[in-house]
Image (cartoon, rainbow, N blue to C red):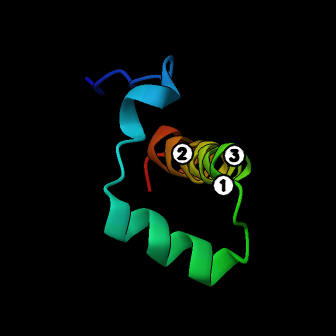
């Protein structure tokens, strides 16, 4: 029996970056506003999670 696929109910709980990580992401994305950077990262995270759950659901 397949395990249930967990949901991403509270994406904020997976957003815990230290100062060095924030600096890195700002340098890589060109986004300097903290709120905009967080929004961007959570959006990309949600897209990646959707792809992974589809793969898991398909069984491959």
The disc label shown at residue 37, or none: 1
Task: Report the side of 23 relative to 41 (left or right).
Answer: left
Q: Nearer the viewer, residue 59 or 5?
A: 5
Circle 2 packing at 10 Å, graded few (<14), some (14-19), many (20+), is some
Q: Where residue 11 sits: x, y (%)?
A: 50, 29
Task: Work out whether 11 lies above or below 21.
Answer: above
What residue sits 61% from the left and 46% below the top? 38
- Residue at numbered disc 2: 49
What residue sits 62% from the left and 42% below the top? 46
Earlier-in-chain disc, 1 versus 3: 1
Q: Nearer the viewer, residue 50 or 56?
A: 50
- Snapshot quadrant of residue 28: bottom right
- Residue at numbered disc 3: 43
Quadrant of image for the C terminus:
bottom left
Task: Work out whether 29 lies above or below 33.
Answer: below
Quadrant of image for the N terminus:
top left
Q: Where residue 41 sits: x, y (%)?
A: 60, 53
Compute the Cα span from label 2 to label 1.
18 Å
What residue sits 38% from the left and 37% below the top? 14
The disc label shown at residue 15, or none: none
Earlier-in-chain disc, 3 versus 2: 3
Helix, strand or loop for disc 3: helix
What residue sits 46% from the left and 77% below the top? 24
Q: Where residue 33 sits: x, y (%)?
A: 71, 55
Compute the Cα span from label 1 to label 3.
10 Å
């Amino acid at each position: 029996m397949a395990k249930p696929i967990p949901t991403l109910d509270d994406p904020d709980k997976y957003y815990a970056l230290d100062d060095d990580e924030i600096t890195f992401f700002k340098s890589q994305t060109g986004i300097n506003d903290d709120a905009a950077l967080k929004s961007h990262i959570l959006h990309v995270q949600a897209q990646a999670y959707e792809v992974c759950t589809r793969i898991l659901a398909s069984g491959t």
